[in-house]
Image (cartoon, helix red, strand yellow):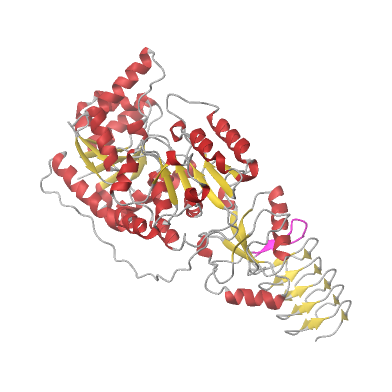
């Protein structure tokens, strides 16, 4: 039995599904095929094996390859029919292909497949072809019961219809389980999500107009416009119209427009830090966003005309009518729903450890109904899972939400070269460190600063940087953002060591930093946590220990310096010098060649050292 999955070449859309099938089902039974060209940025999907794209130097050869792939398959599953007319012609003309095809409706292909604004013969023919295909497929899969009802309303009851949902990534559940939405943001500000893409059916302008009464309140709007516009009815100025209206109504300091796609984990982090989401579309839309928002206890407004509105209410899930925004008070607008019952329902219906069973039942049914294989058995299997700790550190919503990664990359920048970084400290040097990092970003984008970790009062805001304190040291974990690095910005070496000790086991990696004006090569002989100030000059043969700070000093060849040291301004360290750990060298100190300095030594300002200490 071979199931051929026609899928969009998108990690964002398909990565979790690929992983679920590979973990729970035989590799040889499920092949994935891209009929759109797979971009380099999505090429990781090929790592799942038995994944291919159409081969051939021209469209005729690729069409032959497509039919070869389909002829080999017993069942062809179309994960969304979201392709142009030319790529739909085989499904229109081939009755044989239709008989073995299954349409998994994703939303756009159910609600927005028809061009209703252009009336030329060409578009009437395209509409007719798309209608014929959808009406004459023998089996369709809805991802919500509401979609099943919409399908029958448009195309009748000829096809067999079943409801099976796509799973969420396990990592998303892990991130969400760390989050405690009841712990409000310290500065009292509320973050509002408006829509989830640039399609006009989101009705951004109506939503923004309804909320404009709250423009003087402590809030910030996040408006994702990174992709989308209606298939045959593009409003080219729509994105700029939405952005300009938001800026005018609320002020640019209260609006963050997302113009490019961001990393999935980062987007999940954004959703968790929202307080209210306004999804004003009259059709099923943004389900992944909505489920994540509800899971962590955020408030979601939907249109009453959206079939998901009544569906959620029927399941006992708290959602709210978008039409009430224009008449409710601000306190009513931001009042939070019941988190726990929403989370339990979503985990049961969307965790991959539950969902693979429903997909296994579906594959068995398709084998019997379409491939007529009465002997096929569901071969889905349960993984042996390791026990994980439930001792999560509950996260408070952060005052500053950094969404710049991937948004404003200069031309030529490589996304993966930019590191997410937390700046940890206990004095104002952390603000200086951020300024230095931003200076380096002006030359080449390298740092994506997530925020400050400090035990200071959270609402303390530095006037000359945009980042603020997002957690104290007891709350912090690098799991806030997976794969993020941490830098300790603390000039006192004893406090520096104390911070590292307090964070033991909760930091994945400490990074190094050299100011753009420092002459330092960060080789493998430069240990983690080291910081080099403006003007520092370090010979390439020098070895520097962990968490040592070097100000604008000169360190000559073959020198070895231990950990947790401070090297002062204008100090000169000669050739072959060996300096122990926890050593403080004052400003203007000169250490002659091949001198040895023992651990915990303190050299006062201006000392000249010619003998071992």
Magenta span dominant secondary structure: loop
In the rendered picture of this protein, how many numbered marks are placed on residues?
0
Where is residue 492 drawn, in percent x and y? 73, 74
Q: Residue furthest left?
A: 374
Q: Quadrant of residue 159?
A: top left
Q: Is residue 522 magenta?
A: yes
Instruction: Say if 309 sits above or below 242 in the image.
Output: below
Q: Is residue 563 visible?
A: no
Q: Quadrant of residue 531?
A: bottom right
Where is residue 581 drawn, in percent x and y? 70, 80
Which quadrant of the figure contains the N terminus? top left
Instruction: Say if 350 sits above or below 502 in the image.
Output: above
Which quadrant of the figure contains the C terminus? bottom right
Instruction: Say if 259 sits above or below 231 in the image.
Output: below
Residue 230 or residue 512, whichever sits in front: 230
Instruction: Say if 202 sits above or below 180 in the image.
Output: above
Q: Residue furthest top?
A: 121
Question: Residue at image x 43%, y 51%?
Answer: 293
Residue 302 or residue 385, whichever sits in front: 302
Question: Residue at image x 40%, y 55%?
Answer: 295
The answer to whether 581 appears left or right of 140 in the picture is right
Where is residue 445 drawn, in percent x and y? 65, 49
Residue 284 or residue 59, whichever sits in front: 284
Q: Is residue 378 visible?
A: yes
Residue 211 or residue 283, whichever sits in front: 211
Residues rendered magenta in the picture:
512-523
The answer to whether 169 appears left or right of 69 in the picture is right
The answer to whether 263 appears left or right of 603 in the picture is left
Where is residue 195 drawn, in percent x and y? 47, 40
The answer to whether 613 appears left or right of 23 in the picture is right
């Amino acid at each position: 039995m071979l199931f051929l999955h026609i899928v969009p070449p998108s990690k964002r859309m398909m990565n979790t599904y690929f992983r679920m099938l590979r973990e729970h089902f035989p590799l040889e039974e499920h092949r994935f095929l891209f009929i759109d060209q797979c971009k380099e940025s999505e090429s990781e999907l090929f790592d799942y094996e038995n994944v291919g794209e159409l081969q051939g130097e021209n469209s005729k050869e690729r069409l032959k390859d497509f039919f070869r792939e389909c002829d080999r398959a017993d069942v062809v599953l179309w994960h969304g029919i979201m392709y142009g007319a030319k790529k739909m012609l085989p499904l229109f003309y081939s009755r044989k292909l239709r008989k073995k095809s299954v349409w998994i409706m994703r939303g756009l292909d159910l609600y927005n497949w028809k061009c209703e604004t252009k009336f030329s013969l060409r578009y009437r023919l395209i509409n007719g072809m798309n209608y014929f295909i959808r009406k004459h497929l023998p089996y369709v899969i809805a991802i919500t019961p509401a979609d099943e009802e919409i399908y029958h309303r448009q195309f009748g009851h000829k096809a067999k219809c079943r409801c099976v949902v796509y799973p969420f990534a396990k990592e998303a559940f892990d991130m969400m389980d760390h989050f405690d939405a009841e712990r409000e943001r310290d500065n009292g500000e509320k973050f509002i999500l408006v829509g989830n893409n640039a399609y006009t059916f989101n009705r951004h302008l109506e939503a923004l107009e309804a909320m404009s009464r709250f423009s003087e309140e402590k809030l910030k709007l996040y408006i994702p416009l990174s992709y989308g516009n209606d298939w045959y009815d593009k409003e080219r100025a729509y994105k700029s119209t939405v952005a300009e209206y938001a800026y005018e109504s609320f002020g640019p300091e209260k609006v963050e427009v997302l113009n490019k796609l961001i990393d999935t984990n980062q987007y999940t982090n954004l959703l968790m830090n929202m307080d209210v989401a306004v999804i004003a579309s009259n059709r099923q839309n943004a389900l992944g966003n909505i489920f994540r928002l509800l899971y962590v206890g955020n408030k979601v407004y939907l249109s009453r005309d959206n079939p998901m509105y009544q569906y959620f209410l029927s399941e006992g899930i708290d959602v709210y009518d978008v039409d009430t925004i224009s008449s409710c008070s601000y306190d009513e607008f931001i009042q939070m729903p019941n988190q726990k019952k929403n989370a339990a329902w979503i985990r049961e219906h969307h965790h991959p450890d539950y969902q693979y069973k429903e997909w296994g039942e579906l594959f068995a049914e398709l084998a019997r109904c379409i491939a007529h294989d009465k002997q096929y058995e569901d071969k889905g299997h349960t993984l042996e899972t390791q026990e994980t700790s439930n001792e999560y550190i509950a996260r408070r919503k952060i005052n500053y939400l950094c969404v710049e990664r991937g948004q404003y990359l200069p031309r030529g920048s490589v996304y993966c070269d930019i590191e997410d970084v937390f700046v940890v400290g206990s004095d104002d040097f952390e603000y200086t460190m951020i300024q230095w990092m931003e200076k380096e970003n002006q030359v080449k984008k390298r740092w994506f600063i997530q925020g400050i970790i400090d035990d200071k009062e959270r609402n303390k805001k530095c006037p000359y940087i945009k980042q603020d304190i997002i957690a104290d040291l007891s709350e912090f974990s690098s799991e806030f953002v997976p794969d993020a690095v941490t830098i300790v910005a603390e000039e006192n070496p004893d406090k520096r060591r104390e911070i590292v000790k307090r964070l033991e086991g909760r930091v994945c990696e400490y990074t190094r930093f050299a100011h753009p004006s420092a002459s330092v090569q960060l080789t493998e002989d430069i240990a983690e946590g080291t910081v080099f100030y403006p003007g520092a000059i370090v010979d390439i043969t020098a070895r520097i220990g962990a968490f040592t700070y070097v100000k604008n000093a000169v360190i000559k060849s073959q020198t070895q310096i231990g950990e947790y040291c401070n090297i002062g301004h204008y100090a000169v360290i000669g050739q072959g010098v060996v300096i122990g750990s926890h050593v403080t060298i004052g400003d203007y100190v000169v250490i002659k060649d091949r001198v040895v300095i023992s651990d915990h030594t303190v050299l006062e300002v201006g000392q000249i050292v010619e003998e071992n200490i």
